Each structure stands twice: as structure tokens, then as C-alpha cells.
Image (cartoon, coloured by chain):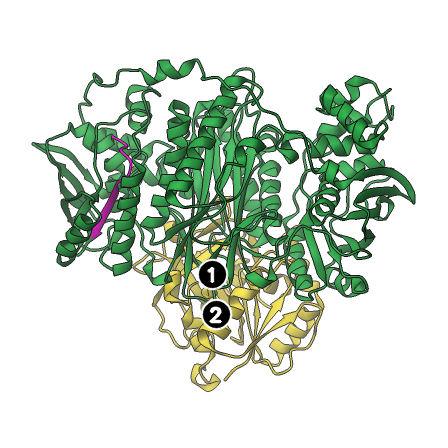
Chain colours: A yellow, B green
Amino acid sequence: MRSFGVVVFPGSNCDQDCHWAVREVIGAPCRYVWHRSTDLAGLDVVILPGGFSYGDYLRTGAVARFSPVMEAVADFAAGGGLVIGICNGFQILLEAGLLPGAMMRNAGQQFVCKYVNLRLESAATPFTNAGQVGTVLRIPVAHGEGNYYADPETLAALNADGQVVFRYCAEDGAITPEANPNGSMDNIAGICNRERNVLGMMPHPERCSETLLNSTDGRLIWESLLQPMAASL
Amino acid sequence: MLDAHVYRELGLKDEEFRRICDLLGREPTPTELAMFSVEWSEHCGYPRSRPLLKLLPRHGKFAPAVYGDAGAIEAAPGLLVVFKVESHNHPSQVEPKQGAATGVGGIIRDIFTMGARPIACLNSLHFGELNRPLARYLFNGVVDGIQFYGNCVGVPTVGGEVIFNDCYKGNCLVNVMCVGTVHKDRLVFAEAKGEGNAVMYVGSSTGRDGIGGCSVLASHEFCEDDEKRPTVQIGDPFTEKCLIEACLEALDTGAIVGLKDMGAAGVTCTTSEMAAAGRVGMDVDLAIIPRREEGMEPYEVMMSESQERMLCVVERGREEEVAAIFHKWDLNAVVIGRVTSDGILRIRDQGAVVAEIDAQDLASPPTYQMPAEEPAYLRQVQSADLSRLPAPADCGKVLLDLLAAPNIASKEWVYHQYDHMVQTNTSVLPGADAAVLRLKGTERAIAVCMDCNPRYCYLDPYVGAQIALAEAARNVVCVGAEPAGITDCLNFGNPEKPDRFWQFREAVRGLVDACREFEVPVVSGNVSFYNETPEDVIFPTPKVGMVGVLEHVDHRTSHEFKREGDVVLLAGRTHAEFGGTEYLKQVHGLEAGRPPALDMQFEKRVQAFVLEAIRAGWLSSAHDCSDGGLGVALAESCIGRRLGAVIELPDDLSPEAWLFSESQSRVVLSAPAGRLAELQKLAAQHEVPLAVLGEVGGDRLVIQMAKTVVDLSVEEMEQRYRRSIACLMG
């Protein structure tokens, strides 16, 4: 079974939620990795959790990328290790250059926390291989800066390459402006790198992995990650 | 002899100053005077309210209630739920964003200072009506402050209320509540103990922020050229988040004897109150306290309200171990002194003693019996004749208008800005009668809400306070919980005015009687007086923050209709009671009459019936029938999942009485038709009238009496209900 690590930055606040979802709900091994540590030994999956690392006082994720652990995470990813950044974790991956593009303030200028619908755009990743393209997932968002931006060439490459993993959609799967909670380009909610071993997503799968939390659609991510690597590619 | 205007400007009376001199056997030093003025103020010492607050019952079914900075109930074997509410009204009126933000920070510290992990916040907000630009500015700023602090600190904001009334136009209310959990044997108290143990200051550095009320000391008598600082404090939620984790980690070592957060006049309150609680003394040197400003006077350090700071007492010899944990989180941790056995609080500045007071003296402010007198307005508003109000031409239109009225309309514009799901416990989300949070590691859950209809309290503070408790209890029952305990936030005008004090006394009396009747303890609370300006005084607002316990998280229920074909039921009795209703305000422009009657015995039976039905698994939905009456309760039940209903009401009351009266002790239920016989039998056992109103189905809410009185599409109701506040806020 794959072993998970959850990085803890000062100001992370979804670290314990990810740990709970992976260990208590899914039952996979999971440990915390303090941001000053560079020891990722024995881990198959590294989670950069949501929150407000360093208060996000400068720019979301801008300080966290300089934490010692991030160098280790970059090496880990370069070696084929699986990395998933959720919300603030996604922002940190962008700041660290492990994923392309940038985040802007939500188009509505307000923090937004609510359940949204996501259309699964790529099942050919180790994070989504338990699903099917076109599946609509109900997963919550909670962020002030989730307005994804990339220059036209990057955006074209992401779309052409199948690197867009999730888009905000209506209940029926239609990609509409009304379904977009933050104004992100092309309704992008999550992307992966070309190698497909680094995923960034704004919605929180750890918040919807149990029936009593009103949706279990987040389990798709954890269950995909527990499938053998070969099945995904 | 010290000039009298110095202590008077600090809020001390002549006789209080004489008493201080007697206690000390000399005149106080400037630092000592400042310390007494704070500890004996209404803010800290409750000299005017304490005699009445003592009457509030402290014990209930869910013992034990414990008392430190917050109280608790035992929600599951060995697991305490700690909760407290606090007001941040005046700071929020001056600077809404930071006022509200620091209110959130302060109440969260009150919870983790007891060793509990904060798991949820709620807030009850009151502003002037939204057509006023100032009200919109304050509302926007306060919500922004709560989201700024709460979202970053990682504690979900799961519920509360927002009320608009012009009595709050000059005094907004920001009442914030926090709930935490801690295992019984891990509870920590705000006590100093053990001679020689270290007194350790942890958290942010100290600046001149928030010295405010004591700034008179920086005037000519003491220090000619000091500037007077604005009294606003700035919140730093990132530091607070680190402080939570560091404190809980440090508590895990077992080396911490006592812990207290620095709120009002931080160093003064923590040193004196911890020493007094532990019946010990302390000898501390202010020069060691980390500063962010140069040249601070000792009294300034003692009075500063810089945020995100705590005082802890650490076992002698384990100081390094504890400090290392705070340093790991990039926080200050310095030993500023030691616990002594002589009971004296000795404050030094670079070794020189600047204050030397018996800690018990500081912690024992005088109390006052305040004169009370029934307000002149009361008889007039109560005697208003509401029996001859013209009937509305179109009840459907009235219902739509009520759904869009800011006091009733959906508050999603507010709670979508709050992270209400972090920590993954929120099972029933905001927008319901109460939020439900599962308790990890147990099968149980808690329900939390805040309630008080201030208009009822204006019309009758005794009954209004009782209804506040009854409604809060009804709300947690409707989501499947048993009422377990409350925290109260008592917001009133100037207690030195007899009519205001009368309102306070009556409201406390109402709460006392209701708490006894419902066997619900008051585990903690807060009093906020002086919520008035020369133009306005607020309605008496005794806010109730309720925690209920669900035996099993699977009992959770919500208000929206779930299935076509379910029967719609009404538990309780409806009378033509228009006094203080939203209908009377919106349609007739009146705030008059008497509040709806409350029969507490009957209320208890209704609640017992609903809870038993929920636990039996017979109900699809349950919704408290309150502001706006039955019409609004039915509409809200339809809107949740966009399911209509066809309702038939008897002709014994007028349509507007059926739809808009706010009779208490009523709950709208839906259930599979096959459960009807069992429900009727259960209701009969509890002697609760249970009327079959109709059936869930379609996409319209149709209400028929002799003729059709309401016929509205669910979509139209939803648009009005959900968009109203966003539209008003632009």
C-alpha cells in the first residue's frame, strides 16, 4: 500500500484533515512532515495541504515555497514521486514552479466556501484513474485566491496535453460561467504536470470523503492513489 | 495627594480610590492605579452585574460544568465541550474589520487556554437597517474581519445570526462564540500554583496598542509628551494559529501548570487573576517582556492589549523544554518571573518594584446594587391594539416580501465568505436551524446555534429572554440534539440608568427561570453594557449560545423537505399573536404589542416529542417555526431541495394569523406517510397537538384555506430569499 506524507507549514490548516482522510477514512499509512524537514524517505505520495502558510501575508504560497521541505519535494517529484497540492498547496506548487500558471484573487473579490460541481477531465493520472472522464463530482471549495491564470501558450498546452484534470461545471456537467466560483480561466479547478505525477487542485477532496460530510466524491482521489501505478498510465 | 481627576478619568469612584488606599496602606503608584482601574472595571470585574449573574444556574443534566475562562459540558464519556461567547461591540463600531477580527481571536484563545482544541466559531451580528450606508459599511467590515481571522486560523465559522434593526445603528453588536473539545483529564485552568514555578510569557511581542481607556495616564500628570494612541488592536490570525498549535503541543508535555490568555489589559489580568485563582503570589519583571516599541512605561506594558499573547505557569526545571516548542513555531517564550507563596503580586521594571498588591484585593472588586425602574415606553408599546390591523390583500406577496426581508432572508452572502468546513466535522452546514459537528473518535455529535429576538426583549425582557433560550433549545432539537448548556452574551445600555438596569434585571430573571425549567446550565458568559449613544439605545439583547448533544451523529436532521409524497405536519398550537413579529414590522411598520406567549411546560413537551421522533428515525425534516411564522417556515422547507408542497389550513384563524403569527413552541415536520400513525400516537403521549397540513410535492408552495391564499413557485421564493442580501450589499 502506498505511504502518504502530509507537509505541515506554519499556517497550514488542512494538514490534520488530510491526515484524517487518508489514515482514518481510507486506512493508508500517513505521517506528518514538518516544513523544515527534508526527509521524505519511504513516502510514495506527498500532500501539500490547504491553509494559510505563513499567513499568506505576502502572496499565497510565496513564502512557503522557500521552506526547506520544498527542495525535497521538487527532488521527490523529479524522481517520479506523487505530489498533490490542495488549495494553498496548489498555490505553493505554482509559486515553486512545479506547475505552470498563477493564482489571482477571486473574480468576486470575496473568499468563497461552498460545495461546487467538478467535471473530471482526465482519468489518465494516478490521482484520478478510478474515475471516468465526464464524471461530475461534488466537492467543496474554500479560498480567496483560486482564479487560475496562465498565458495563452501555457493554457493551450495544458488543454492540448490533457493536463487539465478538473473544471468547475453545472450539476449536469456543462462548463458554464455561472458554475465558476472564482473566475478561473476555462473553469480550471485542477491541473497536473506533463509527467502527470504532480497535481494541483483548489477544491478539497479531504472534506468530502465521508457520508456524514454530505459527499464522498473526494474518495475518488484517495482510491485512485491506492491503485497500482501501472493501471493508471 | 493624587489629583482626583486622574483616578476619575480611569473610571474609579472616590470611594473606590479610598478603598484602594486603605488596602495598600498608602497611595497607589501609577502602575497600581492602572491595574485596579482595569480589574475593578465593569469589563473585568462585573461590579454592577455580578450580583445578578450569580443567580444563573450552573448545573444541568450534562455535568460537569467547569469554570475557567470558559465553561464546559461533558458531551461524551470523558470528552468535554468547552464554549464561551464574548462581545466585541464597541471596537467593531469604531473599526469593523479589526474589531471583529480581534473579537474572534480573543474568544478562540479563551477556548484553547483551557487545553481544548477550538472546533467551531459562531457569531451573532446586529446592525442598523441596510438602507443606511453606515450599516452596510459596518456589516461588510465585520464580515470581512471574521472571514479574515477565522479562515486563516483554521477554525470553521459554522453558524450564528444577523439581525438588522435601527436600534443598532449607533451601536452594532458583534457577539462571537467559540466551541472546543478537550479530554477531561487534559483540562487546564487559569491558575498559578507551586512556589518557584516559572511564569512564562508566550506569543506576540507587546506594543502600545489598545491601551485606550488608560491613556489618561499618559497625560500631563505623569508623562507630559507621550502621544495618545488609537485604541484599535490589530489581529494576526497566522500567529494565533501557530499559538494554538504550540500551546496544545506544550500542554502535551505535562509541564504546564496553568495557562491564561491575555485579553483586556493583558499582563495585568493574567498575572493578577492567575495568582488570585491559585491563592499564590507572583514576582515578575516587565523588562523581560518582548516589545515591539521603544521606551514603554511599566503601566503601558501592564495595560497593553496587544493580541495573540498568553501567560503560562511552567514547572520549575522544565522551562527549556516548553520554550523549545514555542520557538519551533517561531513564537516568543520567555520566563518573566516566578510563583511566590506570599500572595503578593510584585511587578518590577529592571528589578525595581513598580507595583506590589495582594492579588486577592485586585480580584475582589466592590459590587453595587443598581437602582432599577420600569422603562416609560413599556406600557405604551405593550398596550398597542393589534386586533384591528387591516388584513393584507395578498398573503403570497407578503410571504415573498418577508422572505426577502434581511432579518429572514438567507445569510449565504455571509457564510459563503466563512470557511465553515475546515476540520471536517461540519455535518449539517450553515443555513439550518443549528449546525451539527461530529465529535471525532466518538459516535456523538454536537449542535450549536445562537438565538435571541431583540424585538421580543424590547417588548418584554423577561419573556423575551425566556424565548431566546426556548428557541435556541428548539433549534438544536430540530437537528436531533438534546439541549445541554448555554453561554450568554448580555448586551444592554448604560446600567447606571435605572430603566436600562431594569431591562437587564428582567432579562437575567427570565434566563434564570428558563434555564432552571429546561435544566440547562449557563457555563460561561459575558456582559456588555453602555451600548448606547445620545440618540439611541439598543434593544435589550440577551444572546443565548446553545450547545446540544446528539446521541448519535446519524440522528442529524435538517429543515428541508426531502421526498415527494411525504406528509407535512405541524407540532404545536397557533394563535393570532402579532406582537413583535416580523410581519408587523414589515407590513404595518410597527414594533409593538406583547411578544408571543411562552408556556415552558408545553415547549418542553413539543421538544421531547420532536427529539423522540427524530431518534426513532421517523422524520424526514424538522424546522423550527420562528421569525416570520409558519409561512416562512414552510417556504424555507421547500427552498432547501426545491421541493414544493400543497398545504391545507383550517379556517379557525385568519390567513395572516396562520401564516405570519409567531406563536412559540411550533415545529414544521415532514415524514413518510407510513409513519403518520406512529407519530400521532407519540404526539398524543406527549400531549402535543399534531396537525396534518398537507403533502410534499411539485414545484410550487400552494396554501389553501377556504380559498387559495398562497400559490408561489419555489424558484421565485428561492430567488427572493437567496439573493436579497447580496443585492442590498451591491
Q: Is residue B664 magenta?
A: yes
Residue B244 image offset from top left, x and y in percent: 64, 56
How far apart, in angstroms, are the residues tagged by discs 1 and 2? 9 Å
Residue B178 image offset from top left, x and y in percent: 53, 48
Q: Could you tell me the amino acid type at mark 1?
A: Thr
Residue B609 image offset from top left, x and y in percent: 25, 50
Q: Which residue is mark 1?
A: B424
- Label for residue A21? 2
Q: Could you tell me the amino acid type at mark 2?
A: Ala
Q: For the point 87% across and 19% down, which residue is it?
A: B1
Q: For the point 86% across and 28% down, which residue is it?
A: B26
Q: Is residue B202 visible?
A: yes
Counting other residues with Cα less than 10 Å from the Cα at mark 1, is it few (<14), some (14-19), or many (20 or more)?
many
Residue A112 image offset from top left, x and y in percent: 47, 49
How would you classify the magenta stretch by its main secondary structure?
Answer: loop
- Determine the image quadrant of residue A75: bottom right
